[in-house]
Amino acid sequence: MNYLIITIAISLIILYWYIFLLKFKINKLELKIRKSLNTRTNLIPIVFEVTKGLLNKHDEIFKEVIKLRKMEFVSINMEDDLENILNIESLIHHELNFVFKICNKNKDLEKNEKFLYVKELLSKKNLEISEIIEIHKKVSIIYNNFINIKNLTWFWIIIPLNKIWI
């Protein structure tokens, strides 16, 4: 009987330690996502400057992207939750796709080395961001499953961990 209690106690301790390690990993991934998103967003002014003078209605094309970039800047600096940041970033991504569709129709930009370089940087950064977000989702699912298990035990009162957004 004593061995059973000791085994259960040790199992719970290992479970909670693993949950804390998962939470730590999720926090690291969130910081990495925020940093990558910020780096990508900082490339927008470069695209703006490189395309200046080469696009008709240049300011109108970039108007929404610049507005969203300001929202993103405030959101990241206010340490908004990841869900809100990703919603804004999704809008930025769609607006950048629109900008690049217009830019791809411009023959001068197709030959502009600076534009092509920045476009390549943005593509790589988008790929990196999507990979990190996928890892974050997978780890979050595992974490949330363990939180469900934790909540089934009486010990959950002592450790106040909640599910996270995926």
Image (tube, grey):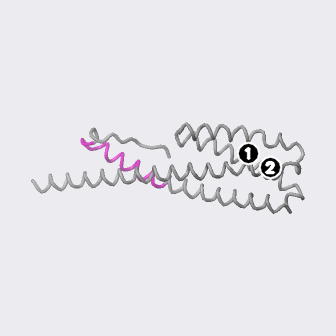
Residue 4 appears in which quarter of the rendering?
bottom left
Residue 35 in the figure: left or right of residue 148: right
Q: Which residues are magenta?
A: 138-155
Residue 51 in the figure: left or right of residue 121: right
Q: Earlier in the sequence, mark 1 or mark 2?
A: 2
Q: Nearer the viewer, residue 155 or 49?
A: 49
Q: Position of residue 98 (x, y in %)?
A: 77, 48
Q: Secondary structure at mark 1?
A: helix
User: From the viewer's perspective, is the residue at label 1 or at label 2 nearer?
Assistant: 2
Q: Residue at x 89, y 58 (%)?
A: 108
Query: Which mark is on residue 71?
Result: none
Query: Which mark is on residue 49?
Result: 2
| Callout 1 crowding tier (Cα within 10 Å): few <14, some 14–19, many ≥20 | some
What kind of residue is marked 1? Answer: Glu
Query: Which mark is on residue 95?
Result: 1
Q: Residue at x 67, y 49 (%)?
A: 42
Q: Is residue 77 covered in magenta?
A: no
Q: Is residue 122 above or below residue 59?
A: below
Q: Position of residue 122 (x, y in %)?
A: 69, 56
| Callout 2 crowding tier (Cα within 10 Å): few <14, some 14–19, many ≥20 | few
Q: Residue at x 72, y 49 (%)?
A: 44
Q: Position of residue 126 (x, y in %)?
A: 65, 56
Task: Mark 1 and mark 2 in contact? Answer it, CB < 8 Å.
Answer: no
Determine the residue located farthest toward the left in the rendered image.
1
Number of marks in the image? 2
Q: Position of residue 63 (x, y in %)?
A: 78, 39
Q: Nearer the viewer, residue 105 or 73?
A: 73
Q: Nearer the viewer, residue 104 or 166?
A: 104
Q: Is residue 141 covered in magenta?
A: yes
What kind of residue is marked 2? Answer: Glu
Q: Is residue 42 above or below residue 131?
A: above
